[in-house]
Each structure stands twice: as C-alpha cells, then as structure tokens.
Amino acid sequence: MNHFILLFSLFLAPAFADKESQETNQNFSSNNVSHKRLKRDWIWNQMHIKEEIDTPLPHHVGKITSSVRNNNAKYIIEGEYANTIFQVQETSGDVYAFERLDREKKAEYELTALIIDKRNNQSLEPPSKFIIKVYDINDNVPVFVQKVFNGSVPEMSPVGTSVTKVTAVDADDPTVTGHATVTYQVIKGDEYFTVDDSGVISTTRADLDRENQSTYEIIVKAKDGPGSSGDSSTATVIITLTDINDNFPVFKHPSFHFKVPENISVGGEVGRVKVEDVDEPQHRNTKYSFVRGDYRDTFEIVANPFTNEGIIRPKKPLDFEKVAEYRFDIEATDPTVDLRYFKSGGSRSISTVTIEVTDVDEPPVFTKLPYEFKVRENDPEIRTLGSVWAHDPDAAKRKIRFIRRRASPNGDYIRVSDTGIIQLPKPLDREFSSSYNITVAAQEILEDGRLSDRESHAQVHVIVTDENDNAPELIYPEEPRVCENAAPGKVIIRISATDKDEISPRGFFKFSLATEDSNFSLVENYDNTANVTVKYGQFNRELAKIHYLPVIISDNGDPELSSTNTLVISVCKCNEKGNFTFCEERAKQVGVSIQALVAIFICIFTIIVFFAVITLLILLRKRHKKDLSGLGRNVAEIHEQLVTYDEEGGGEMDTTSYDVSVLNSVRKNGIKPEAVPSPYAQVQKPPGKITSGAGEMEMMIEVKKDEADNDRDLLPYDTLHIYGYEGAESIAESLSSLESGSSDSDIDYDFLNDWGPRFKMLAELYGSEANEDFVY
C-alpha cells in the first residue's frame, strides 16, 4: 500500500518501528509456516517555503523519508521543476530550492518522490507525488486597472453625488489578512471630490458650475493594508460636468436697427436679433416677447431653433405713407430654466428694436374688392353698369388707367374704359351665361405718358337676372305606344317639360291639349309632369296607325309663355296580356342645329374649292398640249411620225405616206418664228409654186425641241434631230431620172453642195464642180 503519513515527528519514527517489529515477531510465533512481507511507507515533513527569502541559496524546503531499510537506497525526485529549481539529497532525502520563489508567479509545485536501489536502479518503493506550497509575503503594491478614468456629473449637483468608480488590484494572497486590502485617497482635487474604500468618487461641493469650469482632473492613490512596505500607485480621473438649463439668454446688443421696404410680403424676414445663452444648444429655448410698444399686432418674433436668433416678421402689410418708423422693446427669456439653480440678482435681458420703412413705388390700390353688378338680361337700354376706382398710394398721386385683362366667358361682352367705367356693348343673355367675370388691371400713368410696369388687379362680377323670354319645351319620351284595344283611362305615358329660364316661384308648368277632338286626354300631376291617357278606347289601326297629339305647355311666368309640342303616339297590336306584339317603324325626327348646318356648309365649300383647284391644275397641264389638241391628233401619232420619218420617200412631192402638216401647224397656233437665213433662199424657185421655207421648218423643230426639254410632262422628242425635210417641192424638179445629168437644162445645180452630205452625190452628178472645202 502506498499511503503517505504527514506531520510525523522524527522522534516518533523509532517507536513505530519497534512496535511494528513486535507485531511481526508475534505473527511469526503464531504461524511458523506462513511468511508475511514487512509494510513500508513514505515518511516526510510538510513541504512549504516562503517567497522571496533573502538568505543565501539554496533554501531548505523539507525532507522525504521512506521506511525502507537499505544501505543502497537512493532518493530522487521527478517533475517539471525537479533538478532545476528543486533538488533532493540522495541519501538523506532533504529537498532544497535553488531559486528564490515568487508566489505571484506560481503558488505551488507538484513533484514525484522515488527511492531506488542505486546498484540496479530498481524502485524500492512505488513513486509518490507531493506538493510544495509557497507562502505569501506582502511584497506587492496595488495597481490600477487603467491609468486614466473618466466620469461625469451634472453641474450644481448636491454633495455626495456619485461620479465614477476606480479599481486597483493587489497581487498578494487575498486569504492572508491585510495582504490584498486596498485603500484609496484623492491626493489632487480633494477640495471638489472624495473617494471611499470601494473606489467610488463623489462630490464634496454643491456649487460646481459648468459655465465656470467644465472639466476637472484629479489624482487618486491606491495603498494596501498595514505591514506593507508603504508603496502605492496612482491613477488620473477626468471628470466632466454635464450641462443643465440654469442660465437665461442675454441680448448681444442693447438695440437693433433694421431697414425694410414697405412692399415686403407678409411673413417675410425683416431682420434677426441675436442673444447669447451660455448653456449648451439642447438647453437653449429662447422666447421673445414685446415689452413696450403698440406694434405687436404688426410684427411677430419667432425663435430660430438652430441659431436661437429671433426672426422679426410682419403680420400685415406695411405702408410708408402711414407709418415710416416702428420702435419697440423686446425681452428674451427661457421658460425651461431650472429655477432650483436660478442665479438670483440677474438683470432682465431687454433690447430696443427700430424698424425703418423705406418708400417704394407701389401699384395702384382699388377702393373696393371685389366689384359686383347686376343687370337684366336682354335689356337694350342698359349700357353702363358702374365703375371701378383705384388710386396711387404713393406721394406722387399719379393718374390711373384701367385695362381689361381676362374675361369669362371669353368674348366682348363687357368692356372697361380707360377711366374704369364698366360698359355693355350689347344686351346679355342669361341663358348663354348667368354671370360674367372680368379682371380689370390698374396702371399708373407716368410723367412722360407711359404706363408703369406695376399694376394691380380687381375682379368684376356681373350677375344677369332672369327675364321670362323662353317658353317651356317638352322633354320627348322614347316612342310612346298604345294598344289598339286599350281601355279608357289607360295611362300611355308620363310627360315632363323643361325651361331655360328660372323656375317661376308661383307654380308649376301647365299642360293642356290643343284640341279635344282626339281619343286622348291629359291629366296633370302638379309636379311639372302630366299623364297622357286613353279617352274613349279602341283605336282603329286601319284608319290611323300613328297619332300626332299637340300638347300646349305654359310656364306661369310674367309674362306667361307657352309652346305647342307634338307628341307622336304609335298604335300597336297587343296580346291578351297587353304586351306589344307589332308596331310599325316610324321615322324619327332628327333635328339639326345651326352649328351643325354651318359645319356642313363649310365642308361642302371646302370640297368645291378642292375640285376647282384640281380642275385648274389639269387645265394648266393641258395648255402645254394645245398645239396638238387643235389638230385633233394625239401625242402618240406625232411622236410616231417624228421618230420614223427618216427617209426621202418617193420624191419631193410625195407626201401621201408622210403627212408633215402637223409640223406646219405651228403657224396656225400663233407661233411666229424669227427670220433666220434659209439655205433655200439661194435658189430661185419656179413661179406659181409657194413652198414653205426650210428656215421656218427648222425654227418649228427647235421650238418643239425646246418645249420637250422644258416640259417634263410631255413625251421626249429626242429623235427630232434625225428629221430631214426637203420642203414642199424641189426647184431641181424630179431627181428620179438617171439621165437628168446629161440634159440640156440651164439650171445651176451647184447649190446642191450647200445642202449637206445627203445631196453630195447629186451635187457631183449635176454640179459643175464639187465643193472641195465642204467637210462631212
């Protein structure tokens, strides 16, 4: 068994050994046969040592001893700090510390003790663990957990108000009385604050004013209990006084002076008065009030919540001509000041305000707003309703001119003269509009005759009173019908009426039939309606399938007006239950208003003008073709002849196949070509034969070409240049005979050289000599 025996005295060890020997002998004598192993145990003192021993090393800690009796026994220790900090004497078992121990670093050490046979290093006893405890000495001073502490307390707080708490710790053993006990003391700022043993800092005065000093820096010392070396540590505590509302605002200036134009708008800013409040912004709640002066109904002072300034605003319009200067006293107060901390003896904050009103050119001012006139409708005698009036409020007192700006309804129904007279150019119709509104502008006339650019406006209302000038009208129902076998008294339909005039206060509409010679009767309901009923019954569809019933409606007005309205009633076939089974379709009366007729006429006129323009354009286009239309030939025929006529034909007189009269038509149409030298003029033609000159034909062709180039609507005449024309006949007579070259004619054929390349061969045959200079 491995049991440790602690706190054994050394002198008791032999006694225990002797007793154990006696018991062993008894066991042997009682039982000679069996053999029992001797019991062995570890024997040592309690292991402990003080920290920071100032005697020379090593320091004796204690002794480990085993009951083993062996001369070869050897003690050893094992563990983290064995054979470094702690060592054991092999034969005696004394344990020594070879370093000074610090309990604050390590309070106890755990080691393992062994006893072995030094001959073979075998264990003589099982290993056993033991602990070495380090006893504390008061060798550490308290240390604050932080160097700087912060705290706050409202200003003017009572004595003993808690501010903050400081904490210092002592590394010594707290289980040892007095070793870790910390005491605190304020060594700087103790006239304002104190600290108790728990570290709580509190005020010692009730007059701490933030406005005088907002922060305090104090020093607190921490010291442990009696028996210490007397060392201590300190920490800094910064204490801030928080603000309370304990000060009234004070004006920065004893008086304020402002200038403002008289046309400043109501609610506009006149100026700002400034105050000083030493409290923080959240505790500034300045209120401004009038102390002396009779103008509190003219101005108001509103505090700006951000700047605490007093903004002066007018509550009504200012007038330089009436009051040019305002002077009054104002006071600044703060109703939220805590009166518990109010500093008595302070003077009231009062300032004088002077407001100087400057003159500006104001627009005219109407004497009455708005203007209202009444007029009877359709009264031709009324031309003037009244007048509007405005004056110049400035000292200049200029004349005023009135101008109409806007009208509702729009139109020239009401006029305004330059002097402000309201006129009617024509009678007003209440049925068109029961009221007429206009806006009249008033402008000052300057010294140079021009109108001022500043103007004021007034509303003029004209109410048109009603005259009974419209007869009531029937509100036509939807196709009234009656059964042909309807019984007498059967209600066919209920009719009602409307009147554009106002309803007469004397009664309702009156309904009556224009004739009694009908199978219908009319019964009034005295609520502006009447019932049309069957009078005798049994209608004959063979005689009349539709009945036209004239109804007279009067309005009880002054004068009384009436109208006759025709009610169209269809007679239908009905079944036994009185349900309609068949009714003839009748044409509905469709009325067309004057506005619709005007619109229709405008559309018709527009269509006529459109077709007239189209017709004119067609005629102008045909004008380019009038030369061809006179001959009764179309463009295709002319174009065909001009294109294909490119040969000489059977002779000069052969015109049966190719008709050139179309080309000659240019004369008949009035075109007179200019005189151009003609190549035919050199030849004397036979008398009695009138031929058209080649120059005329040449001119005609040029005219046609020019028309084709300039008129894009005509067909192109690009082939006109190949048209060769010899004329009506040739002075050379017939060229068909090959023997004509040897004839005895005295005609000179040299002119053929002038006719161009086509007549070159003839010129060589008949001419005396070819023109050598002719180039082809």
Image (cartoon, rainbow, N blue to C red):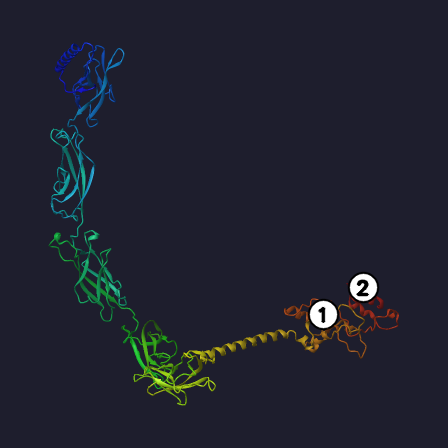
Earlier-in-chain disc, 1 versus 2: 1
Q: Is residue 323 above or below residue 7?
A: below
Residue 640, disc: 1
Instruction: Identify whether 396 is placed above or below 247.
Output: below
- Residue 1, percent from left and from top: 21, 18
Look at the numbered disc 2 and give the secondary structure of its residue.
Answer: loop
Q: The C terminus is located in which quarter?
A: bottom right
Q: Which residue is mark 2?
A: 772
Q: Position of residue 179 (x, y in %)?
A: 14, 30
Q: Is residue 538 left or right of residue 767?
A: left
**At label 1, which amino acid type do we have?**
Glu
Q: Residue at x 56, y 76 (%)?
A: 611
Decide which of 501, 459 is in the foreground and name it: 501
Instruction: Give the Cα separation between the discs numbered 1 and 2.
Output: 38 Å
Quadrant of the image occupied by residue 249: bottom left
- Displayed quadrant of residue 308: bottom left
Secondary structure beneath dot 1 equals helix
Kindly report which numbered mark, 1 or 2, lies closer to the viewer in this rendering: 1
Given residues 458 and 585, the one toward you in this image is 585
How many numbered marks, from 0 up?
A: 2
> Taking the image as drawn, is residue 552 in sight?
no
Few, some or many C-alpha atoms within 10 Å of disc 2 (few <14, some 14-19, many ≥20)?
A: few
Give the x, y percent position of residue 8: 14, 18
Residue 765 in view (yes/no): yes
Q: Which mark is residue 21?
A: none
Q: Is residue 608 left or right of residue 104?
A: right
Question: In x, y percent, where is residue 709?
Answer: 65, 68
Q: Which amino acid is tagged 2?
A: Glu
